[in-house]
Every structure is written in structure tokens, then in C-alpha cells.
Image (cartoon, rainbow, N blue to C red):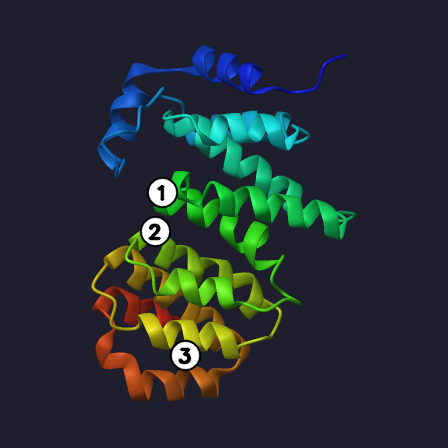
Amino acid sequence: MAGPTAESVRAALTEAADEAERAKIVRRTTDDRTTVIGVRMGTVFAIAQAHAAMGLGEVDRLLVSDAYEERMVAVSVLDFQARRPRITGDERRALYELWMRRLDRIDTWDYIDRSAPRVVGLYLLDRPRDVLFDLARSADRWHRRAAVVAAYSIIRSGDLDDPLALCELLAADPERFVQTAVGTALREIGYVDRARLEEFLDRRGADLIAEALRTARTALR
């Protein structure tokens, strides 16, 4: 019996399509090249869950699609696979390498937030994080957001030095989508070490936009 495929994902998404939902999703897309099928996010995630055992070659076929929901299924499958309790080091590396190879197709905040913490962050827990600093210095706003969002899992492991250094680099970033990720990272840092968050905000809080600063301060309540 054949395993789950990109074509079976496409068929499931097409069957679940709804024109009213498509209109809502179109309003929040950030790239004119993106096409929208029109499927509720809960249904998209359910389809991804049903295809969680998909081979990475099939996931790759979805990642190169212009359809918003197809790429959302792809990053969700990567995330589901990265969560597996018995995942091997080689399997985790393969997920990471596919994600990085298709980074330019992971070009909305929700693709990044859905997958970067576990696919990228967990892979880098016990490895050098130079790639995150390279992304943080990119001219591409999504690469910069990915650098910070990937660090969420690193923060939750109790390792704060590199995440704080990333926040230092991006505290004055002009892009809202980057700033909001920095605010979330700082909040998570504060949950682990309140004093280090307070010290950071004393020095750099004025550089954050109000939305990011409010999020960061959540950890101080």
C-alpha cells in the first residue's frame, strides 16, 4: 500500500475548499505569488496530521508549491515529525536540511512559527548556532524572524546566551514581524531567568516597538 503523497494532500485540500474561507485567507497573505485554495486552518492541520508519515521527497513537492495551504501542510508535517519521541539524529538532521534548503519558500510568519522552533531549534540544541546569526543579519525579514523563532526551543531548554545575543542584534529591527518575534523570545527568556530579562529591557527596551515590549513584559507580571 502506497504511503501518503503530495497528490493525496492536494486532493484532500481541494475537497475541503470553501470560497468564503479562501477570501479570508487571501486578506492575510503577504506574498502576491501565493495562491489560496480556501481551507480552514483546523482542517489543514488535520490533513497534515493524517499525512504525518509522508516521506521528505513528497514534503519537498509541497514546499515548492505556490498554494498557501500546501506549504502549510508541508511545514506542519515537518513539525509533527520533529516532535516524534523516538526520532533519530539522522532523521532530525534530514528535517533540518530540507527546511533550510527550502527556506525561501517558508516565507510567511505562520509557516515559520509552525515549524522553526522544533525543526530548526531542536536540531541546534547541541550544535553551534552560527546559522541563526547569519539569518539574523539577512536583508530578508522572514530570515530574521526565523532566526529568533527557531531560538524558542533553545530558550525553553534553559540555554539563554545565544537567544539573548539574537535579541540584541534585532532589538531595533524596523520590521514588525521581526520585532514581535523578539518580544516573544524575551518573554520566554523572562520565564526562565527574570533577572536577565530585566537587565536586557533596562538597556534595550526603548528600542523595541510597543507591541514587542508589552509581550516581553508579560513575564514580569
Question: Counting residues from the N terminus, which is met first, the one under dot 1 or under dot 2?
Answer: 1
Q: Looking at the image, which residue is at 65% across and 28% down? A: 54
Q: Are marks 1 and 2 in contact (CB under 8 Å)?
A: yes
From what the image shows, is residue 153 above or below residue 54? Answer: below
Q: Which mark is residue 126?
A: none
Mark 1–mark 2 Cα distance, whole angstroms, equals 6 Å
Disc 2 and disc 3 in contact, CB within 8 angstroms: no
Residue nearer the viewer, 28 or 88:
88
Q: Secondary structure at mark 1?
A: loop
**Residue 83 percent across, percent down from the top left:** 66, 47
Q: Is residue 46 visible?
A: no
Depth check, front residue: 133 or 75: 133
* Res 23 seen here: yes
Q: Which residue is disc 1 drawn over?
A: 107
On screen, residue 80 above or below 18 = below
Give the residue drawn at x 50%, y 47%. Answer: 100
Q: Which comes sooner in the sequence, label 2 or label 3?
A: 2
- Name which residue type carries label 3: Leu
The residue lying at 44 percent from left, 45 percent from top is: 103
Q: Type of residue at label 2? A: Trp
Residue position marked by numbered label 3 in the rendering:
220
Q: Is residue 21 above or below residue 141?
A: above
User: Residue 142, which numbered label?
Assistant: 2
